[in-house]
Amino acid sequence: MEKKILAAAAFFGMTAVILGAFGAHALKDALEESRAAIFETAVRYQFYHALLLLAIGSVTVLGRKARRASALLAASGIVLFSGSLYLISTAGLTGFDFRPIVFITPLGGVLLVVAWLLLFIDFLRKKT
């Protein structure tokens, strides 16, 4: 399981760097300022949570269930939260109508919060 979590961390970290560079260079003049800020938020949260996955896969004090559940929630949250923000921020370029998926962003955010919450609870339950 740790191997899969670490691979997911590496994938999300790598794609955050790629998308960050793409946003800073290729989209620099194509996105209006508010849309560029949304894109940057997506990259930043993806990167933060790639690091979270790296920690989840590396820390040995986590229980098996907490590790698995928090990793799954974090990965799903990245896809939903950052993924929807990427779509929303580039809607003007792609013609994508984001209104039908606007609920996905807060759902992804909730998954990220719950991933952190599970870790918090697991750490509090440790006896040492």
Image (spheres, rainbow, N blue to C red):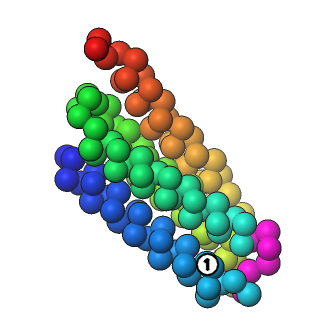
Residue 114 drawn in magenta: no
Residue at 45% of width from left, 38% of height from top? 115
In this picture, residue 101 sits left or right of residue 53: right
Q: Does residue 126 sit above or below 41 in this rendering?
A: above
Q: Which region shows up in magenta?
A: 30-35
Residue at 40% of width from left, 69% of height from top? 14
Residue 33 drawn in magenta: yes
For residue 8, what is the image quadrant? Answer: bottom left
Asked if one can make out residue 100 in the rendered structure from this viewpoint, the answer is no
Q: Does residue 46 sit above or below 64 in this rendering?
A: below
Where is residue 107 drawn, in percent x and y? 58, 46
In this picture, residue 18 sits left or right of residue 54: right
Residue at 34% of width from left, 50% of height from top? 54
In this picture, residue 66 sits left or right of residue 34: left
Where is residue 2 drawn, in percent x and y? 21, 47
For residue 118, what is the image quadrant? Answer: top left
Marks counted in the figure total 1
> Which amino acid type corresponds to the residue marked 1 in the rendered image?
Gly
Q: Which residue is mark 1?
A: 23
Q: Quadrant of the C terminus?
A: top left
Where is residue 52 drawn, in percent x and y? 42, 47
Q: Does residue 124 sit above or below 11 in this rendering?
A: above
